[in-house]
Every structure is written in structure tokens, then in C-alpha cells.
């Protein structure tokens, strides 16, 4: 018997479904199964673009695997929440490894071995993913290939046909309506993480020593791994300082308590406004920028003990470069 009506009986749980189809499609080369597991009109939103329909997703998957044939995507966690008796929303954290042995989006093969994360929010119904928001650590990929993030992004714009013709980064103005309209669940852990992020974006950085474990383990864009309050402060203050008047919004927040796991939460958020300050993105450009971010966290007896936050640095730089020339 299926764990939910509409799903195949071979999947024992929400986690089994999300982890299982990821393995089948990308590691076992079942690319054709995207027709089964991704709805024909499903929308994938990433900071870099918006893609609708199976055809574009299948083409992009083939191109990625041609460039990185040994790509592996083991799932670190799946945080999920029921939407209805027949559907759920998952926030999936992937730790990806790959070797750059083929030509493609990232240029001529470098032979470099890569490690990076992806965070993806997926609305699942009828044995398929019907709506998706995905953040890939593009900055980590580019840096591990030995390239400068700004220079690579500038070259990407040129490869895509220049400023007038290149693929536009995601903003709400180019979003497409999908079937999922939820904002999350009523878990106190999701609410707690959303509150922490909102307070930091209101310049209340004292929340870090007050609410984070002193030994907190942190993972940020650029494949940054760090520990402790100072590292959390550097990340969040650097981001906020670059966009001091940008509007921060919680887009989606869920929390979950599971056997053998600490309480955890997944929050998708956005930052929209001008690049007016010195911070993580160089000299102020006054460019209008939209940032899609996803944060996962685990909580312990002394506060937030682990945090994973991803943004796509290349999508941010692309917006800055397009505005400044």
C-alpha cells in the first residue's frame, strides 16, 4: 500500500519518494523517468532562470550529465510537511560530487573534482513533482574549477548572446503560476527559524549569540564550512550590508520532528532591493537585485546547532553586471 493515495506502493514514505526518484533519474540514468516523475507542465524556479515543462528539464539534465558523467547526489535530509492527504511539500538537501570531464555550461573540461550542495523545495502529488524551487551553490562550482565568480558570470552573459539576449535571472516579475500556493505548516521550529532570519534582516545581529549554539556548525554559499558565532555573523552581516534597504520576505517555512533526528526546519526566503552597500558583493552598484535563498537548520539544547544556507552568487552578480554594464 502506498504511503499516500496516488503514489506507487514501492515508496514507503515521503523521504523514500524524494530520495528514490533523485537516485533513479540522475545516478541510474533514468532520464526518461522525468516524464513520469515531473508533471508535463511543472515549473522549476532557480535563481538563474525559470523553466517550464519536461522537455527543457530533460534537455538540461542530459547536458549536465554529459558535462559531469560521474555526478552523484546523495540526500543529506528531506524535511517535509503534509499539504493534503494526497500531497506534501519537501525541502531536500543534496550533497553533490562530480568531476568536470565534459564541455558545457562551465566551459572546457577542467578535470576538477567538485563538491557542492543543492537545496530544493518540491510540491509532490500524484507520484510526481508538480512545482519546484531550487538553489544550487554555483559559486562553489565555479571556484572549485579555479575560476573567478565575477569573471565567469561576465563570460556567461557573453556566451548567452550578450546583455540583451542572455537568460534573465529569476524575479517575481517572470515567475509562472504553479499549483502550489502554500506558505508552510504551523510547526514552532519553522516559525523559530523564520523569526531568527527576520530578526537578522532587521539588523538584530545580537540574535546570533543569543539563539545559536556556541559550537554551531555552518554551511554557506561558496562551499563555506565554519563554526561559531563569528562565522554566522560574518555571513549574515555581509549579506545584509550589501543590500541594507532591501525588502526581506519569508516565502515558505516548515518544521519537523522525527524519530532519531533533532528538531529541524526549512525556510525559503527572498531579499529584493538595491545593491547600495559595501558587503559581500563589492562596491555598491545601485543595481536592483532579487535573491532567492533557502535555509535548513537543526536545533539542540543550546539553540540552533546546525545551519545550511544557500544563495546563488552568480545569479546575484549577473543582475549587478547587467545593470552596470
Image (tube, rainbow, N blue to C red):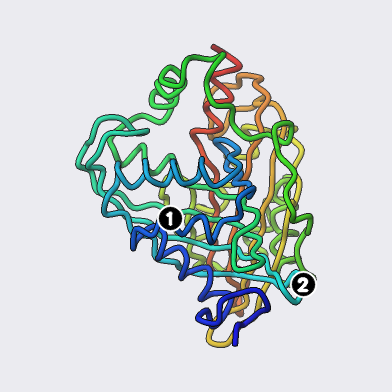
Quadrant where the image shows the N terminus? bottom right
Q: Residue furthest left?
A: 111
Q: Judge by depth and name the residue closer to the eye, 123 or 321.
A: 123
Question: Mark number for residue 32?
Answer: 1
Q: Judge by depth and name the residue closer to the eye, 205 or 58.
A: 58
The image shows residue 254 at horizontal and vertical percentages of 70, 66
The residue positioned 33% from the left and 47% from the top of the image is 65
Question: Mark number for residue 84?
Answer: 2
Marks 1/2: CA distance? 28 Å
Q: Residues within 10 Å of mark 2 (few under 14, many from 20)?
A: few
The image shows residue 19 at horizontal and vertical percentages of 47, 69
The image shows residue 15 at horizontal and vertical percentages of 54, 74
Q: Residues within 10 Å of mark 1 (few under 14, many from 20)?
A: few
Res. 292 image quadrant:
top right
Q: How many marks?
A: 2
Quadrant where the image shows the C terminus? top right
Question: Mark number for residue 296?
Answer: none
Res. 64 image quadrant:
top left
The image shows residue 58 at horizontal and vertical percentages of 46, 46
The residue positioned 64% from the left and 27% from the top of the image is 277
Left or right? Give the position of 287 relative to 281.
Answer: right
Mark 1 lies on a secondary structure that is helix
Of marks 1 and 2, which one's residue comes earlier in the chain?
Answer: 1
Left or right? Give the position of 240 relative to 38.
Answer: right
The residue positioned 45% from the left and 63% from the top of the image is 22
Q: Judge by depth and name the residue closer to the eye, 240 or 109.
A: 109
Left or right? Give the position of 37 relative to 140.
Answer: right
The residue positioned 44% from the left and 41% from the top of the image is 60
Amino acid at each position: 500500500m502506498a504511503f499516500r493515495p496516488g503514489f506507487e506502493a514501492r515508496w514507503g514514505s515521503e523521504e523514500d519518494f524524494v530520495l528514490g526518484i533523485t537516485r533513479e533519474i540522475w545516478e541510474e540514468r533514468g532520464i526518461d523517468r522525468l516524464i513520469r516523475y515531473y508533471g508535463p507542465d511543472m515549473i522549476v524556479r532557480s535563481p538563474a532562470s525559470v523553466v517550464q515543462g519536461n522537455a527543457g528539464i530533460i534537455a538540461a539534465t542530459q547536458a549536465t550529465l554529459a558535462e559531469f558523467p560521474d555526478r552523484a547526489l546523495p540526500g543529506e535530509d528531506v524535511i517535509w510537511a503534509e499539504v493534503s492527504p494526497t500531497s506534501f511539500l519537501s525541502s531536500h538537501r543534496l550533497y553533490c560530487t562530480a568531476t568536470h570531464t565534459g564541455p558545457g555550461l562551465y566551459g572546457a573540461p577542467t578535470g576538477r573534482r567538485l563538491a557542492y550542495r543543492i537545496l530544493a523545495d518540491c510540491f509532490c502529488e500524484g507520484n510526481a513533482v508538480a512545482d519546484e524551487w531550487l538553489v544550487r551553490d554555483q559559486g562553489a562550482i565555479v571556484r572549485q574549477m579555479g575560476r573567478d565568480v565575477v569573471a565567469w558570470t561576465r563570460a556567461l552573459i557573453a556566451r548567452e548572446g550578450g546583455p540583451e539576449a542572455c537568460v534573465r535571472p529569476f524575479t517575481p516579475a517572470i515567475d509562472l503560476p504553479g499549483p502550489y500556493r502554500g506558505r508552510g505548516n504551523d510547526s514552532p521550529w519553522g516559525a523559530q527559524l523564520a523569526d531568527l532570519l527576520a530578526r537578522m534582516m532587521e539588523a538584530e545581529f545580537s540574535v546570533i549569540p543569543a539563539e545559536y549554539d556556541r559550537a554551531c556548525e555552518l554551511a554557506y554559499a561558496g562551499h563555506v564550512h565554519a563554526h561559531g558565532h563569528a562565522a554566522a555573523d560574518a555571513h549574515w552581516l555581509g549579506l545584509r550590508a550589501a543590500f541594507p534597504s532591501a525588502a526581506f520576505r519569508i516565502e515558505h517555512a516548515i518544521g519537523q520532528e522525527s524519530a532519531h533526528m533533532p528538531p529541524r526546519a526549512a525556510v525559503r526566503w527572498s531579499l529584493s532591493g538595491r545593491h547600495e552597500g559595501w558587503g559581500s558583493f563589492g562596491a555598491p552598484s545601485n543595481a536592483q537585485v532579487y535573491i532567492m535563498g533557502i535555509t535548513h537548520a537543526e536545533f539542540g539544547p543550546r539553540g540552533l546547532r546546525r545551519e545550511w544556507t544557500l544563495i546563488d552568487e552568480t545569479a546575484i552578480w549577473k543582475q549587478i553586471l547587467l545593470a552596470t554594464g
